[in-house]
Structure formats: structure tokens, C-alpha cells
């Protein structure tokens, strides 16, 4: 018999909670046993009382209660920690998703040992779909597209609730997001683990905001941040190069403004240029750490700084050499310096990526018993 843990985060869902749990319990049969873990995120309505009454009626139900409202991600973190099933699924308490899809569609690849994670897509043909907000749909598609760019996956629905995991997979992931940012965070982290990921179409009965839908614009902004935060350091090289273009541009602006400021204050051109270059390099380094190369440091901090300085000096030498070479062969000053800048930009990026902030890939994930 397969044992499935279903984690249900709950916040102010008194109108739908009981019907949702009834639908969840009905998917159990002679081949599938359930462990339903409901995490009340400090609801201000009657949800927690309903949860306690449900737990008294059904031995399959476990429940936990947060002493303050912490968010969906925090509730799932609590639920995942206590799961004991072979597989772990997420079920919202608002009846937007049909639990039968977990049993009939999402569990199959996991039970057959074809997948480590199965994701239910609202945008693949999979059943009934309620027609709702156009711009909400476009926002979901945009976030999924951006996430795919960074993870190199080809998902159709990154923000979906329905994700089912092998238990050892989800319990090996450290969840940092407390709110709706958990969706892009989970996708980023399972992508980095190089798991076997499948996607199947599901039905979807979305709610309007008047009916209690909670996700909003600020959650979309947070999702954008999470896509960058959890993916940038492992994104495909073309994506990292685009990000570094913005970092290099900011550092260049700082360089120029610092030079102009010092020079206008009477500091000599050589000293102004040297100080401006150094400050620009420091800004570049800090932005690389905070935005692009979030990493488990391979080097100690002094060694990392030393390598960074050596890369900067090497690239500076290459800049001078290319410019001088082209001038010697009759190229204009503008062409010589512009060409050198293109090479310097590329060498700067490669030096930082592979020398200053090297990060080895994790390799294909293996179950803990085989690790």
C-alpha cells in the first residue's frame, strides 16, 4: 500500500475547509492510505475549531497551529517536517483544486518510479477550468516564462499549488520563503537538484477575490524577486551574462560619477581615475555577491578577494594591451577602445564566473538511501 501525506495550509478558510478535507479523504482506497496534515496559520475565523473537530472524527488527520500568522510557505514548512508518507502532496484548503487529480494523475509517475516530483498544470488540457481574470493568467504565464529562463525547465505552470514529491526529496529541501514565494523557490531548488520532473494537466476551479482569493500584486513582485534570488547563481550562462550586463553597467556609472566628482574637486586625473576604478570594482564585487553569484563560497574571504583583485588587474592589462595593439595598427582611438571594452566585458564575466565565484553543479539527485 502506498502512503500519501497531504499537507493542507489553512488561513481563514472556514467556508471551504470541511468540504475540502472530505474530498481529500475520499481518495483513499485499498491501495492508498492517507496522512492529512492540516497547518492552521493563526486563522482569525473559525477554521482552527473546525480542524480540531475534523481531527476527532478522522484518525488520518494531524494538525498543527501557528501562534502567529506566518504565511503559506511557513505552514508548508511545518507540514513537510512532520510528513511520514512515501510521497508528499500540497493541497490548498479553498477547493480550487480537485484531490481526485492527485490520485488519478499526479501519483502515477511517482509510484512507477519514473519521477521524483510531479507538478499539476492548470494550463495543460486536464479537465474543467473556470474562466476568470485575463491579467492574472498573463501574470502567471510571464512568471512561469521567466522562471523557465532561469531554471532551464519547460514548465507550463510554475505557480500551481499541486506539486507532489517523494518524501525524501521535499524533506531534503530547506524552505526559506514564508509566504507565496515558496512556489518559485521550490521550482528553483528542485531544478538545481536535477530531479526527474513530470507535469500533467489538472482541472481548476479558481475563486474570485470576493470569494476569498488571497494572492495579489505584491505576491507577484515577491515571485519576481524569488526567481532571481534562488536561480541567478545557477542560471544558464546567457541569462547570467544578461544579469552581469546590468551589474557592469551600474558599476560603470559609479566609476564615471566618482571620477567626475573627484576631478571637479581638484583631484588629479590619474588619482581620480584610479580611485574611481577601485570604487567601481568594489561595487561590481558587492553586486555580484548579492545578486548574481549567491554561492557556498569555495574560497575563504581573503583568498576570494585576492583572486578578484588578480582578475581585475589581469583584465585591466588585457584592456591596455588590446587598445595599444589596435592603435599601433592604425585603428582609430574610438574603435580601439570600444573593441577592448567588449573583450574586457566578456573576460570580466568569465573571470568572475569561473575563477572568483566558481560553483560546481550538484549532480543528479539520488535518494538518501543511495547517497
Image (cartoon, helix red, strand yellow):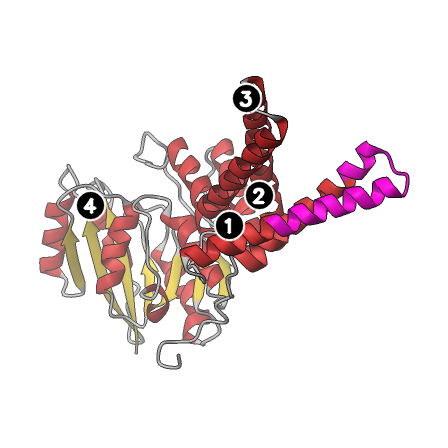
Q: Which mark is residue 232?
A: 1
Q: Give the residue drawn at x 35%, y 44%.
A: 180
Task: Classify 371 as above or below 93.
Answer: below
Q: Label 3's element?
A: helix
Quote the CA–CA distance across marks 1 and 3: 33 Å
- Circle 2 packing at 10 Å, graded few (<14), some (14-19), many (20+), is some
Q: Pointer 3: what residue?
A: 261
In the image, farthest residue toward the bottom: 370
Q: Pointer 2: what residue?
A: 243
Q: Give the residue drawn at x 44%, y 44%.
A: 290
Check if mark 1's residue and mark 3's residue have beta carbons within 8 Å: no
Mark 1 or mark 3, whichever is nearer to me: 3
| Mark toward the start of the polypeptide (1 vs 3) | 1
- Circle 4 packing at 10 Å, graded few (<14), some (14-19), many (20+), is many
Check if mark 4's residue and mark 1's residue have beta carbons within 8 Å: no
Check if mark 2's residue and mark 1's residue have beta carbons within 8 Å: yes
Task: Classify 338 as above or below 196.
Answer: above
Q: Nearer the viewer, residue 203 or 259?
A: 259
| Mark toward the start of the polypeptide (2 vs 4) | 4
Q: Is residue 111 a member of the stretch shown in magenta?
A: no
Quote the CA–CA distance across marks 2 and 1: 8 Å
Q: Specify start and end residues of the magenta stretch as a single range.
A: 313-338
Amino acid at each position: 500500500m502506498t502512503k500519501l501525506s497531504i499537507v493542507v495550509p489553512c488561513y481563514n478558510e472556514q467556508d471551504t475547509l470541511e468540504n475540502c478535507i472530505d474530498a481529500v479523504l475520499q481518495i483513499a482506497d485499498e491501495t492508498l492510505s492517507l496522512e492529512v496534515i492540516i497547518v492552521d496559520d493563526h486563522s482569525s475565523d473559525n477554521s482552527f475549531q473546525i480542524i480540531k473537530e475534523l481531527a476527532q472524527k478522522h484518525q488520518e488527520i494531524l494538525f498543527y497551529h501557528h501562534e502567529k500568522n506566518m504565511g503559506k510557505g511557513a505552514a508548508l514548512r511545518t507540514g513537510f517536517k512532520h510528513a511520514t508518507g512515501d510521497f508528499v502532496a500540497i493541497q490548498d484548503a479553498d477547493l480550487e483544486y480537485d484531490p481526485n487529480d492527485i490520485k488519478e494523475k499526479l501519483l502515477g509517475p511517482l509510484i512507477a518510479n519514473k519521477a521524483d516530483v510531479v507538478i499539476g498544470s492548470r494550463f495543460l488540457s486536464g479537465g474543467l477550468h473556470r474562466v476568470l481574470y485575463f491579467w492574472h493568467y498573463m501574470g502567471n504565464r510571464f512568471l512561469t516564462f521567466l522562471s523557465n529562463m532561469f531554471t532551464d525547465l519547460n514548465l507550463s505552470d510554475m505557480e500551481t499549488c499541486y506539486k507532489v514529491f517523494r518524501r525524501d526529496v521535499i524533506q531534503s529541501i530547506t524552505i526559506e520563503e514564508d509566504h507565496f514565494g515558496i512556489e518559485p523557490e521550490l521550482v528553483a531548488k528542485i531544478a538545481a537538484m536535477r530531479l526527474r520532473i513530470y507535469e500533467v494537466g489538472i482541472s481548476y476551479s479558481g475563486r474570485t477575490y470576493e470569494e476569498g482569493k488571497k494572492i495579489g500584486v505584491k505576491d507577484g513582485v515577491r515571485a519576481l524577486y524569488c526567481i532571481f534570488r534562488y536561480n541567478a547563481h545557477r542560471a544558464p550562462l546567457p541569462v547570467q551574462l544578461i544579469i552581469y550586463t546590468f551589474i557592469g553597467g551600474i558599476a560603470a556609472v559609479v566609476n564615471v560619477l566618482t571620477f567626475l566628482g573627484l576631478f571637479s574637486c581638484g583631484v588629479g586625473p590619474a588619482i581620480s581615475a584610479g580611485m574611481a576604478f577601485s570604487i567601481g570594482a568594489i561595487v561590481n564585487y558587492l553586486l555580484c555577491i548579492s545578486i548574481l553569484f549567491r554561492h557556498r563560497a569555495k574560497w575563504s574571504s581573503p583568498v576570494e578577494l585576492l583572486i578578484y583583485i588578480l582578475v581585475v588587474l589581469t583584465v585591466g592589462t588585457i584592456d591596455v594591451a588590446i587598445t595599444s595593439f589596435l592603435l599601433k595598427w592604425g585603428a582609430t582611438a574610438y574603435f580601439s577602445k570600444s573593441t577592448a571594452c567588449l573583450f574586457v566585458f566578456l573576460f570580466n564575466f568569465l573571470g568572475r564566473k569561473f575563477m572568483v565565484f566558481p560553483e560546481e553543479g550538484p549532480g543528479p539527485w539520488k535518494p538518501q538511501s543511495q547517497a
